[in-house]
Image (cartoon, helix red, strand yellow):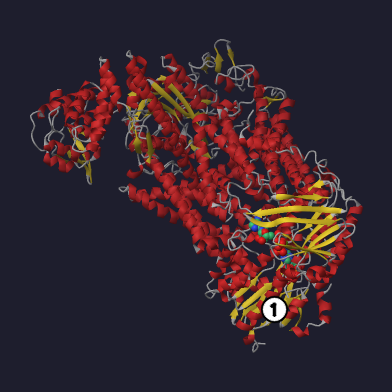
Amino acid sequence: ADTIKVGVLHSLSGTMAISETTLKDTVLMMVDEQNKKGGLLGKKLEAVVVDPASNWPLFAEKARELLAKDKVDVVFGCWTSVSRKSVLPVFEELNGLLFYPVQYEGEESSKNVFYTGAAPNQQAIPAVDYLMNDLEVERWVLAGTDYVYPRTTNKILEAYLKAKGVAADDIMINYTPFGHSDWQSIVSDIKKFGSAGKKTAVVSTINGDANVPFYKELANQQISAEDIPVVAFSVGEEELAGLDTGPLVGHLAAWNYFMSIDTPANEAAIANWHAFIKNDERTFNDPMEATVIGFNLWAKAVEKAKTTEVDKVSDAIIGLEVPNLTGGTAKMLANHHLTKPVFIGEIRDDGQLDVVWQTEGEVPGDAWSDFLDGSKDIEADWVTLKCGNYNTKTKKCSGQNY
Amino acid sequence: MHTPLLKTLLTERGSQVFLGVLIVTAILVPLLNLAVPADSALHVSTYTVTLLGKYLCYALLAIAVDLVWGYCGILSLGHTAFFALGGYAMGMYLMRQIGTRGVYGDPVLPDFMVFLNWSELPWYWHGFDMFWFAMLMVVLAPGALAYVFGWFAFRSRVTGVYLSIITQALTFALLLAFFRNEMGFGGNNGLTDFKDLLGFDLQADATRIGLFLATAFALGGGYVACRAIAASRAGRVIRAIRDAEGRARFIGYRVESYKLWLWTFSAVLAGIAGALYVPQVGIINPGEFAPINAIEIVIWVAVGGRGTLYGAVLGALVVNYAKTWFTGAFPEVWLYALGALFVLVTLFLPQGIVGLLARARKTA
Amino acid sequence: MKLPAALETFADREHVFEFMARGSRVPRLDVSHNVILYLEDITVAFDGFRALNDLTLYVDAGELRCIIGPNGAGKTTMMDVITGKTRPDSGSAWFGQTIDLLQLDEPEIAAAGIGRKFQKPTVFTEHSVFENLELAMAGDKRVWRILFAKLTPAQIERIESVLETIGLKDQRDARAGSLSHGQKQWLEIGMLLMQDPQLLLVDEPVAGMTPQETERTAELLLGLAGKHSVVVVEHDMAFVRSIARKVTVLHEGSVLAEGSLDEVQNNAKVVEVYLGE
Amino acid sequence: MTARLHRPPGRTVAHLMLWCWALLLASGLQVAAAQAPGDTHHAEQVAQLATAGFGEKERIVDALLEARHPQTRMLLAAFLDGRLASRKSDGKVFITEDADDGVALVDPVDASAAGTAKSSALRKIGTNNRLRKKLKGAIALFDLDDADAGVRLAAVDEMLRELDATTVSALRTRLGVEDSARVRRALEVGLALADLSSPDAEVRLAAVGTLEGELGTAVYNRLKTLERDEPDARVRDAALSGLRHIDQWRRFYGGVETLFFGLSLGSVLVLAAIGLAITFGVMGVINMAHGELMMIGAYTAYVMQLLLPQHTTLAVLLAVPAAFLVSGLVGVGIERGIVRFLYGRPLETLLATFGLSLILQQAVRSIFSPLNRSVATPEFMSGSWQINEVFSLTWNRLYIVIFALLVFALLQLVLNKTSLGLKVRAVSQNREMARALGVRSARVDAMTFGLGAGVAGVAGVALSQLTNVGPNLGQSYIVDSFMVVVFGGVGNLWGTLIGGMSLGVVNKLLEPWSGAVMAKILVLVFLILFIQRRPRGLFPHKGRAAEGH
Amino acid sequence: MSDQGESHMLSIRGLNQFYGGSHILWDIDLDIPRGSVTCLMGRNGMGKTTLLKCVMGLLPAATGEIRLGEDDLRKRPAEARATLGVGYVPQGREIFPRLTVEENLKLSLLAGRAKPGALDRIYETFPVLRQMTKRRGGDLSGGQQQQLAIGRALLLDPQLLILDEPCEGIQPNIVHDIGELILRLNREQGLTVLLVEQKLPFARRVASEFRILDKGRLVASSAIAGLTDDIVRKHLTV
Ligand SMILES: Nc1ncnc2c1ncn2[C@@H]1O[C@H](COP(=O)(O)OP(=O)(O)OP(=O)(O)O)[C@@H](O)[C@H]1O
Ligand SMILES: Nc1ncnc2c1ncn2[C@@H]1O[C@H](COP(=O)(O)OP(=O)(O)OP(=O)(O)O)[C@@H](O)[C@H]1O
Ligand SMILES: [Mg+2]
Ligand SMILES: [Mg+2]
């Protein structure tokens, strides 16, 4: 082939379009930039965009189309866990290469997937540490949408909190359906839970669309961040852009990137983005940074391997480092996860987030949580063990599809 | 009009064409996939085979909907429920087949249960390690649900939109229930990561061909069965019920048993379609229950031409192919194209594509 | 154990699985007392308005009974009660000695042997005339039987002969929906004939028919009487005169007069409310 | 330090604070342009804010409080509101004010105007949660002496959150001079709460007595600890009875609250469904684009806000008629362009309008991008109406309940009391015959559909106040809307109202007991069972007409 | 012909009508004299109702011309024909089932042709309607509905009243009254009536003219006196 094909597998319609469309644009921007730099290995890059329309079987179909029909060299895509789960067998069967840019529940490490978003240990645990140590929170509401990511995160957090001596009475766990829009009773319950005289915080793994009505209700029931701060793992600049942030000032979010962080690299990236999308108002957010990092790592690996062949690129990429937009470097680990800095930000009235706390240096992503019974003993290592789910007790590598 | 089934099938133009094309496809596709080298222009890629297999599942589902809607006037917005239940039954079998090959290596528990700290298999998962049992459930789960639901609804004489909406409520309730992780069906992520079916590797081309053939066979069988029903005297009663339910009662037909029977049969067909669908797409998740999907099925039928069965098949193929093509070719604007397709078909092809073909034949 | 209210209502409706074990519920028709229909003290009220008011009426086996009465007297409502479409607020309705009509639903009543022609002709508009007659044909109407049933030559012949009788031979394969009003009337009569019921309830059969067709209808009904019992509702007095033996006049939901046509025609009250000068 | 705090405030200061509160800084500054002795110290502290970390900032706030410079109140308020910034060029700290040409600067020491600057030339001095809390408490200390009783009351409430020696003595002093009964009561409660920690059992007993009848959480929590830790049996009993009393009221108000939640959820359902009750219920068009018509209404609200960026309230109020018009016109367009060819083929309207809904969704994605848009909540709709300590109603919900009822009443009026309504119903029941009686059915159809669509648009404006304004807005309500219409009985507006409200209430009654997901499932199951009992909905059409024949 | 045009309320020339493929009306030429009561007769399925629907505009005429006095009706939709003064009582009554009796009647008033007090006069003519003003039209008995349909048409204050088998299902004394009413309106207000009726005695009593349709063609037309047994036998019996 005379071009290198880059598949883009993000929903452009349906429920997930809200989040994923931006990522498609980010990949296109990266392709564009790389081509300006002369492409890769002397070839131009060509983006192949498809729309899996927020439909999970369609994700699998489109993945197959990209790999088998369009013969792309790499795919950037997916947002929800289920979409990733749906395409995973396809990537393994056809030996494709997927860069997945969103924070997720972990418990996975595939030979064909590189996870450039945060694992739970790169987001949730540091956030809780901050609340506990800096804000002296004693009572916890773990509120989430009822699916795997919140369930896992909350399970990890519950175990973690209990280990830190928090009483069961002081933890309230609540799950709501996708797209939940009537938060009156739950917010009222949180308010009651939080008025027992102990400092209370909400750890929110509420997903997507449900956040806007949730925050609106918080504001209207006059729960301010000083009373009951909410720290969210799925609410970033882009979500806040759809909100009247005035009443939300002070609520928190934990991410590995904030648009407001003042570094030259970040400034340049944002400027690029604005130039590319031709709109100075557009936000830049964490999954976008993850996409950028993933793309840069891939490009670097291709150059190192001098080919786009999946196996060679996969081998070459491990150990490579590219700079984060917020300073420091992202290094691809043997478990196909990245090292990432963790930031806690407070919501400002302009919809940006101010960093109020950050980890010292980068946290390496952990594919298999140390706080879950089933996965404590599992390890992922694609260099020495050549396995994504190696059980250190039984000394077996399980769950591989090839 | 009162000829035996075989004759009906052979003389009716639509059936002839449909069965002919189906048989030819079923023979050619495997041949062109397995026997023709990959670089030949005639080669049918595994991608295409899988895609066709998926379409055929949809076609079977569309037939099931057309049977109740086109012939009996029951506009079901709940057939996704039966489809998904069939799919889950198959998915549970496939999950159990994974055995110790799951990521946690648990011999009994599927990965997601280990992950959620479940210590033992819920009772309703037992037996699914046996193929025959799972296949029984593919038929029984949707069938029983349809029977119970229909038994209540039809004897209460719920009709028209009221029936449509409660079927929608049914599938919506199931959607929410299956989303719950406590239900023990994998929540939002559903069931994935299947390895093999009856010992055949799901990723092998031969298995895919096998599944494709099974689907084509099921579709052909389903079609013939539905056609037989439609052409029988019971078929005429069913259409009479569609047009004037009350009148049919006054001449002595027990409307609810006709409806119940047809409804349950249709649900079983949908369940079979779901069971064939799951191994071919590799995932079953509660999204399959979504009410909007049910509306889409109705639309396939309407686009193809309602009340003809082969129209339903045609509609399912056309709409889904359009979707596949549009989402690849114009990912940014394909909804305009699909939307416009629906609007134009309605305005200019009141009998669907089949009506157009019939008209063309008449004028020719 | 207390069931939730909603469940309870399902639990206590008695005829569970009725359509699995049908047939056994409907006893044989017994007309040993020579009366085929007993309506006693039937009252039907709609929002307080009594459409039927303590109506009592008996129809003998083999009789041809004409029922007349002003518009709104309750004639159609009475038929609704007999065929199970409307449940009376009080009273009893028996078909022969053994069959309590109020315990049965429409298909059971039809199966027991009561056929009806509606005031507004209702046929299966998407079916052909032939199929309409086929649908109405007497016989076992359970799903499994019908599914595998084939028309026997005798049955086809019967349909053809009815087609002849109702004068729609030329329209045999026409869509019933495309028939004119009068043709639909005939088709409905034809369906009634196919049903071969013991008791025929005929609501305004000659509305919209030409005088000659009216005559033919009269002949037809007269021919049916004797073997069958026929209850005819009609406002066309000429027609009534041509068939009537016994006439019942309904008024405001109950019987105003009963007797031979001459008797009722000379009843002053009947003249006042119904016949006029 | 406390001594100085208790000095009765001068007139100028009081004035100043009032002005500050009203955010009319500029005029207030003129009055306060006096030189005070602590200026240099004050200026030093302020200057340090430019570079301090959060911990340091807290310390500076303490220091400022102690010094009690006349400008402190203004400075702290600006700090809290995020209007404190340092100039990048020289690091000097200013209070900022939005002005036409960039940002107006105000000197924090003497409150004099200090020119303007570009916002890019300034670096905002940030706060965090702890700091904001501290600032609020600090400002409350000032506000305790405000001329406005409402402000004083708010200050007392703020101080009750955390009582320490400083606040207690401030409260006590204020009680001496307070003349408003409400504020006095609040002060007494605060002091009684403090007294509960007194070593003297009698004092504690008296304090519990004072607290009788109070429902607030501070009181409740304090009594709770008392009931647990109190050595004196009399005090413990008194606390216990106090707790019982509060529990009782909490339960009562909890019930009322649930009911309100149900009604408010119900009114959202009603609003979403009521347009459909016309296009679907009355006209028989299975209008799958109904949700998108709501979405158009919501986007109209968004556009209104873009047009009137400074007038949130006006924008929302104008959005109601605007959305009615926009959605209504789109509706008329749909009717004239598509639906009118499909009368008598209701199921085909489903197909066409579904196609249309896809097109409209994608159109919105193309025009407004797939991202959610924010529609600000106007002042009068934000926050809640605190009826008492344990019970409050959020304004937006309250308005939406009222709004839903209003829309319902208007529609009812139009359909039943106007000749249009009569024509609409006639046309929907028998189009041909209506025409034969001189009804211009084409016009009536277009107007009816337009009316239904317009009402959907209006509902969209209401939804924009509650949830996302995005391309998926319509999709998330379409299923619910159909359910409500059908549950109520097709073609019956009352049915839609009662149906929507009761589904809302049932949902909210179940929710605390079963969780949100199960509640929804149970409501659906309830709906299915209900339809078995009443196969034609809550308010079915009765009589012969409904059955045919 | 054209000189007669003045005196004709309705004149039809060369009307053809089809349902799908089948030709129902063949080249109908028909005149209804102003001030007459014309009875249109014919066996079932001969096209009487079809003809009336064409006149009313509920079916588009395939070819041909229809004039109401001077007006070319073909250009006008049904609703305009109603406002021009064509009242229509359809076969099968076509009552608005979920409007009350009163609303059914009021709808005609909206056309704006009725004179004040018209509603009361209708109630006098059909007292049963007055008793049932609040009842849904669909709940009325067949005969009551028929009366309502006639009342509704009269409230348009038509110049041409079209009645499709108006006596169907009506009790004898009211049939008589309807006959009287038609005659009265015809006599007193000069109302032109086009009536489809199968019952000869009634037709003979009220009609001044008759027309006969047979297999979609106009086969006879003359004054009612000319309705001989011969014609009846030839065209009205099977
Ligand atoms: N569902 C109903 N609600 C209210 N009134 C009703 C209902 N059904 C029937 N009625 C009334 O009951 C009375 C009897 O009606 P029915 O149809 O039985 O009369 P009928 O004798 O058949 O008259 P006709 O000769 O005109 O057909 C009428 O006054 C009618 O308006
Ligand atoms: N909707 C239709 N589609 C097709 N054919 C129709 C339709 N309506 C009527 N016809 C046919 O047109 C012919 C004339 O019908 P029409 O209703 O005008 O008859 P008619 O003279 O009014 O009869 P009747 O006295 O029975 O009312 C009939 O043969 C009928 O079968
Ligand atoms: Mg009657
Ligand atoms: Mg006719």
Spot occupied by residue A150 in the image (x, y as percentages of width and height):
48, 26
Q: Give above or below for B139 relative to D168.
A: below
Observer-nearest of A80 and E22: E22
- Amino acid carrying mark 1 in the image: Gly
Q: Give above or below for E100 relative to B118.
A: below
Disc 1 element: strand
Left or right: residue B113 versus residue D38 is right
Residue named by callout 1? E14
Q: Quadrant location of residue D529?
A: top right
Q: Residue at x 54, y 62 (%)?
A: D422
Observer-nearest of A37 and E189: E189
Quarter of the rendered image showing ligand 1 = bottom right
Left or right: residue D77 versus residue D220 is left
Residue B120 in view here: yes
Residue most toward the bottom?
Answer: E3
Observer-nearest of D453 and B346: D453
Chain letter of the residue carrying label 1: E
Spot occupied by residue D394 in the image (x, y as percentages of width and height):
38, 39
Left or right: residue A187 versus residue D526 is left
Q: Residue at x 66, y 74 (%)?
A: E162
